[in-house]
Each structure stands twice: as structure tokens, then as C-alpha cells.
Amino acid sequence: MTLLYFAWVRQKIGRSEETLALPEGVATVGELAAWLAKRGAGYADAFADPKRLRAAVNQDHVSFDAPVSANDEVAFFPPVTGG
Amino acid sequence: MRTIRIQAGVFDVNAEIAALTKDAANVGAVVTFTGHVRGDDGLSSLTLEHYPHMTEREIARCIGEAEQRWPLLGATVIHRIGKLMRGEPIVLVAVAATHRQAAFAAAEFLMDYLKTRAPFWKEEDRGGAKRWVEHRESDAQRAKRWE
């Protein structure tokens, strides 16, 4: 899967994109976020409060209970602030 | 006619109106909204990032919803990215319709939806002190009015 990070999520993690094999036991966006939070200090900081985060799967806004699968593009970011 | 562009450079509102109305036979109303970078609390500039491709898709979806609600003849959404100084134009929404009611309503709808759905993020710079703009609950409430 491809993971994308934007705004302060990108800054805290220190990268904008990475590819990953779907971790074992991860079936939803929320489970993926919890798994990522354990990957290191930057990740722990970025995913410390999932309520502050939003997600997209294959470029559609989704909730954290949405399913994820091996070939998905999953993005994590703060609530949008355009306009 | 639909135009959706994400660009670093400035846009020309009159040129966009001309393009929007060129092929539409029965245009009686064009409403444009231009958003500018506010100089809140000593803000010197904003830097905008976005999620390429998803941004265009979300904006297209917003225009599609507007077209379901009002009889539109065309819509243009242009959003700038990168570093923008205080006072600079940042976003343009232009809507063409036969009558003004549809054009006014759809322009407001598009701005409200854009602000809550299109994946853009602003980082403010106040004399070197940088801060990501927080999502505003009032924007979410404004978008909810249309549900």
C-alpha cells in the first residue's frame, strides 16, 4: 500500500510518502493509524490523538472504521483548511 | 463548462469570466467570489499545500452537487498553492446561470463545500513564526446548512 501524509502529519513523521505491505491484523484505517503510531517517535506524535486526524482511501474521504487493503492509497492529514 | 485548476500563479478574473461565458448561449448571471489572504494578527504570508488529484476530484464532486441543485451553465474553481503574501488572491469561484438566484446560491455553496472537503492545508507565517491553520467549526456549520 501507499501511504501519504500532509501538513503537520507530514512534518511530524518527516516524510510525505512511503510504501508498505499491509500489516498483519490491520483491516481498517483506524487499525492502520494505531499500528503506525507504534513505528517511532515521529509517528507516535503524529498519531497521538486520532480525533485530530482525517483520512482518505484511494482519494475519497473516509472515516476511521473504513476498510483498507493491500493495494490502497491511504492518506492521513489534519482537517482541511482551504478556501 | 467546468474549469478546475490548482496553480501557483495569480488568476485573471475577467479572463475567467470570459472563458466561462464564451460558449454558454443563455447566460444571464455570473457570480464570482475571490478569496484573499487576510492579514490577521500580523500575518505576513501563507503557504498552501494540497493532495494532488484528490483535490481536483473533490472540487469536481462539489461542482457536480451544485449542478444537481441549481440549473447552472458553467462553473470555474481556481485555487492557488504555494507561498502567498498578505492581500493576495487565493481562490476564485465563478458560476454562470440564466438567473441570478442560482448563480448566487451555487457560488456560496461551492465555497462552503470547498472549505470543508477540498484537501488543502494552510500554514501561516508571522515574521518567521509558523503555524498550521486550525479547522474552524464555523466552516463546518456553514457547510451543514446545505444538507
Image (spheres, grey):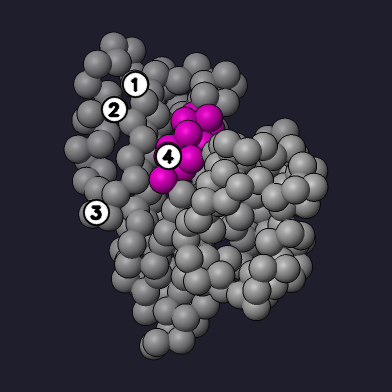
Q: CA distance from mark 1 to mark 4?
A: 20 Å
- The residue located at (46%, 74%) in the rendering is B124
Label ID, residue B20 = 2
Q: Which residues are magenta?
A: B52-63
Label ID, residue B53 = 4
- The residue located at (48%, 40%) in the rendering is B54
Query: Do the residues indicated by labels 1 and 4 lie within the same chain of the protein?
Result: yes
SS class, disc 3: loop
Query: Do the residues indicated by labels 1 and 2 lie within the same chain of the protein?
Result: yes
Residue A23: in magenta span: no
Q: Dots 3 and 4: beta carbons under 8 Å?
A: no
**Is residue B41 left or right of B138 when viewed as pictured?**
left
Residue A50 visible in the shown view? yes
Mark 2 or mark 3, earlier in chain = 3
- The residue located at (56%, 73%) in the rendering is A12
Q: Dots 2 and 3: beta carbons under 8 Å?
A: no
Mark 2 or mark 4, earlier in chain = 2
Q: B97 and B48: which one is in front?
A: B48
Q: CA distance from mark 2 to mark 3?
A: 17 Å
Residue depth check, mark 3 versus mark 4: number of the one nearer the observer: 4
Residue depth check, mark 1 versus mark 2: number of the one nearer the observer: 1
- Magenta span main SS: helix
**x then y, percent, for residue B110:** 52, 38
SS class, disc 1: loop
Q: B55 and B98: which one is in front?
A: B55
- Give the residue at mark 3: B10
Residue B30 visible in the shown view? no
Query: Do the residues indicated by labels 1 and 3 lie within the same chain of the protein?
Result: yes
Residue depth check, mark 2 versus mark 3: number of the one nearer the observer: 3
SS class, disc 4: loop
Q: B6 and B99: which one is in front?
A: B6
